[in-house]
Image: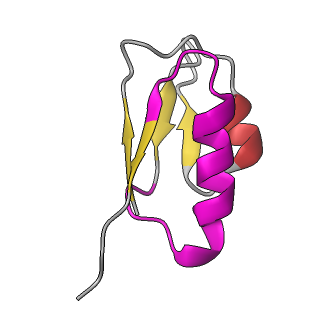
Amino acid sequence: MRVHIDQEKCCGAGSCVLSAPEVFDQREEDGIVVLLDAAPPAELHDAVREAAAICPAAAITVELVERV
């Protein structure tokens, strides 16, 4: 899994941080999302997918990366 964020779209709702605090944080000054881990471990994949699904600004995209 590869996680991408679009800080231009982010509205600072913070739902991603609540869903996956190991992967997402927010900037102190304006609440915009900060990506902590672009390739989170498998045990966090469900939480990351949930964060992307509930993001009100659709600022999070998830790319599935196949391991070889």
Q: Residue furthest bottom?
A: 68
Residue 54 is left or right of residue 28, and the answer is: right
Q: Quadrant of the N terminus?
A: bottom left
| Quadrant in the picture for the C terminus | bottom left
- Residue furthest right as drawn: 18
Given residues 28 and 26, the one toward you in this image is 26
In the displayed structure, 37 sits above or below 28; it is: below
Q: Residue at x 56, y 10 (%)?
A: 11
**Membership of 47 in magenta stretch:** yes
Colour scheme employed for the rendering of this structure: secondary structure
Residue 42 counted in the magenta span: yes
- What is the span of residues highlighted in magenta in the rendered image? 37-60
Q: Position of residue 6 (x, y in %)?
A: 36, 25
Left or right: where 59 falls relative to 22:
left
Q: Is residue 17 above or below residue 59?
A: below
Residue 21 at least partly seen? no
Q: Observer-nearest residue: 41 or 33?
A: 41
Residue 2 seen in render: yes
Q: Residue at x 39, y 21 (%)?
A: 7
Residue 28 percent across, percent down from the top left: 58, 23
Q: Is residue 18 left or right of residue 4?
A: right
Name the residue: 60% across, 52% down.
Answer: 48
**Quarter of the view holding residue 35:** top left
